[in-house]
Image: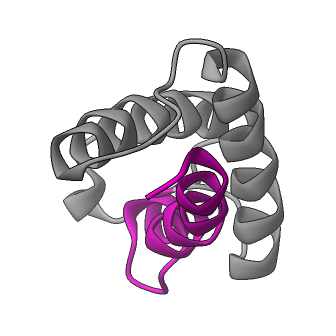
Amino acid sequence: MDKKTWTSSMSSFIPAAFCKADSPFIKCYEVNQTQCLDISLTVTQRCMADNEKIMPKVFNKADSIKWGEIIGTCAGDKLTDIIKLRAGKDASCGL
């Protein structure tokens, strides 16, 4: 898969995964689903832009997994830097 197709799919996949109704971001942080999607799309795109020069031009399955983890970790870290933990959060948050 070419880089443009891969980054486009990640721009949808990562925010959708982070912002599912039962996700830790929604359950544990002061953010609603719409805000979560907006912020996570922004940080996902920023992480991809920051790594664009070192990402492969064509992604095989191993590259997709490797770079999905790199971009997902980057975006998750940036998201938690922006949003605040919810007061009285559920015990399952474990944070």
Quarter of the C terminus within the rendering: top left
Residue at the image position 62 percent from the left and 71 percent from the top: 12
At which x and y percent is residue 74? 51, 28
Q: Position of residue 88 (x, y in %)?
A: 48, 58
x, y percentage for residue 83?
A: 71, 43
The magenta-colored residue range is: 1-28
Image vertical order of residue 20 relative to residue 65, above or below: below
Secondary structure mostly taken by the magenta-highlighted segment of the chain: helix
21 vs 68, left or right, is right
List the single residue furthest toward the left. Answer: 62
In the image, taking residue 58 as reference, residue 19 lies left or right, namely right
Of residues 40 and 6, the one nearer the viewer is 6
**Closer to the camera in the image, 93 or 48:** 48
Q: Quadrant of residue 81?
A: top right
Q: Reply above or below: 64 against 25.
A: above
Residue drawn at (51%, 60%), measured in percent from left and top?
14
Residue 19 quadrant: bottom right
Vertical order, 23 against 22 (above or below): above
Q: Residue 48: x and y, percent? A: 65, 33
Which of the colour schemes (rainbow, by chain, secondary structure, one colour) is used?
one colour
Residue at screen point 31% across, 38% down: 69
Q: Is residue 39 left or right of residue 15?
A: right
Q: Residue at x 58, y 54 (%)?
A: 86
Q: Is residue 87 visible?
A: no
Quarter-of-image position of residue 72: top left
Residue 88 among those drawn in magenta: no
